[in-house]
């Protein structure tokens, strides 16, 4: 994996304000005014955050005219994740070998489903907005692998379209997979360990020590996303639902599934996200 990162001469950089937020990710005492001031220092990022804040999913008909309005109307944690999401999509303006719109559409849908899962979880001490951040980043390792190993990755992509398991193909070909690459990028970006663990263990959440509700939420979100986009019925999706991963989160499956189906019926706001 070190060889992969050596091939990529310049890693994508996230904006400085995103780095500041991530350094204070778990600091509940950080000043809202301090964060708003940091965001305003980056006009392009501020504009992108406001576009997202006014989108159908977040704006809900409200006029969010400033970063201060966004914090007041949407809440501090929501704005923080919008800034992180905006910064990450800005960092990856080009995705060689990938459909940029489809890539980020899936990332944002998995993020919203993961957030919904933890909001419905009876497990104490979880933060739905953190699950959203992990969901945004869950496939980020793919982008670097496409940059560093474009020909091999395109062949793997074609096999995945035919039903092969991506992580198995990547492990066989490279000795690592996109989850490990994503976790390593998060480490180099100095992301919190909570996020790094979620990215690395998203395909095997019960292997994380201690248990990571964020890895579990991304795992289940990816499963539900695939079920819905592939046209599986509710009965099919729920009968094959990973019960061992669901159990620690203590989820009401029927209520959760109905909420997620409704979530995916709404406008995905992808154009506001990528503008």
Image (tube, rainbow, N blue to C red):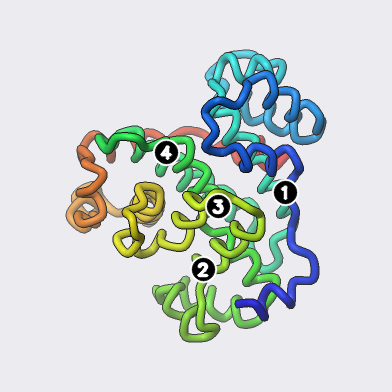
Residue 219 relative to residue 158: left or right? left
- Alpha carbon of mark 1 to alpha carbon of mark 3: how far? 13 Å
Task: State the residue position of label 1.
Answer: 14
Mark number, residue 180: 2
Crowd band around label 1 with a 10 angstrom C-alpha radius: few (<14), some (14–19), many (20+) = some
Q: Nearer the viewer, mark 1 or mark 3?
A: 1
Secondary structure type for disc 4: helix
Give coordinates of residue 200: x percent, y percent.
46, 62
- Alpha carbon of mark 1 to alpha carbon of mark 4: how far? 22 Å
Q: Nearer the viewer, mark 2 or mark 3?
A: 2
- Alpha carbon of mark 2 to alpha carbon of mark 3: how far? 12 Å
Give coordinates of residue 237: x percent, y percent.
25, 53
Can residue 196 be seen here?
A: yes
- Identify whether 33 is placed above or below 11: above
- Alpha carbon of mark 3 to alpha carbon of mark 4: how far? 13 Å
Q: Decide which of tag 3 and tag 4 comes sooner along the chain.
A: 4
Secondary structure type for disc 1: loop
């Amino acid at each position: 994996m070190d060889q992969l990162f050596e091939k990529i001469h310049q890693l994508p950089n996230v904006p400085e304000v995103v780095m500041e937020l991530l350094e204070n990710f778990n600091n509940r005492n950080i000043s809202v005014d301090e964060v708003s001031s940091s965001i305003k220092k980056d006009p392009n990022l501020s504009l992108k955050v406001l576009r997202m804040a006014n989108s159908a999913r977040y704006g809900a008909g409200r006029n969010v005219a400033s970063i201060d309005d966004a914090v007041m109307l949407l809440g501090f944690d929501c704005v923080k994740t919008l800034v992180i999401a905006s910064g990450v999509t800005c960092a990856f303006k080009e995705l060689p070998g990938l459909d940029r719109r489809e890539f980020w559409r899936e990332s944002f849908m998995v993020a919203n489903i993961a957030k919904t899962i933890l909001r419905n979880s009876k497990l104490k001490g979880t933060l739905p907005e953190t699950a959203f951040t992990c969901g945004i980043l869950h496939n980020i390792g793919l982008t670097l692998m496409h940059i560093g190993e474009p020909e091999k990755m395109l062949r793997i992509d074609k096999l995945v379209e035919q039903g092969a398991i991506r992580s198995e193909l990547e492990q066989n070909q490279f000795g690592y997979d996109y989850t490990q690459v994503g976790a390593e990028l998060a480490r180099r970006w100095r992301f919190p360990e909570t996020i790094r663990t979620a990215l690395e263990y998203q395909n095997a959440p019960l292997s994380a020590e201690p248990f990571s509700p964020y890895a579990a939420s991304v795992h289940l979100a990816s499963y539900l996303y695939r079920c819905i986009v592939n046209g599986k019925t509710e009965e099919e999706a729920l009968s094959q639902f990973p019960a061992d991963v669901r159990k620690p989160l203590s989820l009401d499956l029927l209520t959760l599934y109905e909420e997620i189906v409704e979530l995916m019926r709404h406008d995905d706001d992808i154009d506001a996200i990528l503008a």
